[in-house]
Image (cartoon, coloured by chain):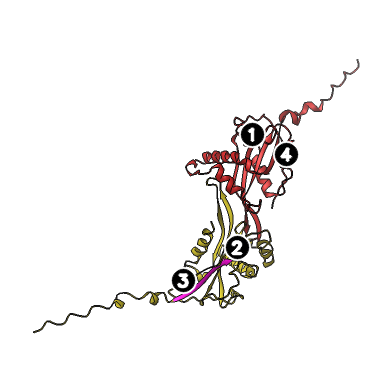
Chain colours: A yellow, B red
Amino acid sequence: MAAAAPPPAPTPAATSLPETATHRHPVFTRIRLAVPSDVPHIHKMTYQMAVFERLTHLFATTESSLTSTLFSPDNKPFHSFTVFILEVSSNPFTDTHFDNDPFYKPVTKTVHLELPLDDPEKETFRNQLGNEVFVAGFVLFSPNYSTFLAKPGFYVEDLFVRECYRRKGFGRMLLSAVAKQL
Amino acid sequence: MAAAAPPPAPTPAATSLPETATHRHPVFTRIRLAVPSDVPHIHKMTYQMAVFERLTHLFATTESSLTSTLFSPDNKPFHSFTVFILEVSSNPFTDTHFDNDPFYKPVTKTVHLELPLDDPEKETFRNQLGNEVFVAGFVLFSPNYSTFLAKPGFYVEDLFVRECYRRKGFGRMLLSAVAKQL
């Protein structure tokens, strides 16, 4: 009697799920310098930060006070306090509004998430300049200096990622963008 | 018998020591922006701070690294990290080296001390530009920003008064000079 044919080798596909099966929701992200038209979003995120920290009784910021202080002509990015904005989109970024910024070339990155994003406040945080682009967070930092190292650095004053975008590495992306300026 | 003449009224001088008797050692102080020729003094004070903080193993500053980072052309005083120098003298300040600083007019103040100052390191900290002028301390500060108040401020990174000048209000004078820039 002839020996039974050996069982077929397992197909590679059966040993593990392909990457695209577990992380099939691409999110396009962009980090760029804040501009005056971001002020309504910065204002709302700052208030959400005050809510998170239970410090709304200390919150005295208005859109107009933010505009006049964050964007005064003396404020050269990276040489005084500076704000980076994190934007997300389910489409690649096609707008070029920020590509010619003389101080900072925007950084884009595609992140693959396991679950689709659901932003309950997307209309509030829609960036009017982009196509389906939403503001997801910001970081505010200032130059500092170590006399022990004779080395300039940055002090991160505020780091904020909106609630529905947390635990996805976006805060780390904002901090990395700051660190890369050193 | 005629009544005895009343005793003479006590002279006002007898009721208390005049101010000049207890505080008869005037010290003339000046706070001004640091200039590159201050670097050897800043370097030595920074090292003394590291000794005080028991952190000399982290001290990696040289005069040349301080010069290139503290006084780069991009560093506009008050818009990036900034150093104020405190000088003292037993004579009024007569030099005019710093009077035309476009960013900061030096502030002088006379302080009356109970005891004369004895600076064991006066030759090390002598300012060559002045007449019997000695560097006594410094403060290094950077712009920061409160998003809750939409208000720029300063973060004081280092405040140092040399040992023989401590407990005389000089640290407070340096902090006040920073606060007055807000």
The residues tagged by marks 4 and 1 sit, at their Cα atoms, a distance apart of 19 Å
Task: Residue at 50%, 73% (x, y): give it.
Answer: A28
Task: Residue at 65%, 42% (x, y): give it.
Answer: B85
Label 2 in the same subunit as label 1: no
Please name the residue that numbered disc 2 is placed on: A103
- Give coordinates of residue B106: x percent, y percent: 72, 43
Describe the element under mark 1 as helix, strand or loop. loop
Describe the element under mark 3 as helix, strand or loop. strand
Describe the element under mark 4 as helix, strand or loop. strand
- Give coordinates of residue A23: x percent, y percent: 41, 74
Please name the residue that numbered disc 3 is placed on: A111
Q: Nearer the viewer, mark 2 or mark 4?
A: 2
Q: Amino acid at mark 4?
A: Lys
Q: Amino acid at mark 3?
A: Val
The chain ID associated with circle 3 is A
Task: Mark 2 and mark 3 in contact? Answer it, CB < 8 Å.
Answer: no
Instruction: State the residue in front, B73 or A128.
Output: B73
Q: Taking B89 as reference, is A105 above or below it?
A: below
Left or right: A13 with respect to A151? left
Q: Which disc is residue B109 wearing?
A: 4
Q: Which disc is residue A73 wearing?
A: none
Left or right: B60 with respect to B89? left
Q: Amino acid at mark 1?
A: Arg
Q: Amino acid at mark 2?
A: Phe
Which mark sits nearer the N-terminus, 4 or 1? 4
Determine if residue A165 is in view.
yes
Label 4 in the same subunit as label 1: yes
The chain ID associated with circle 2 is A
What's the magenta region?
A: A25-33
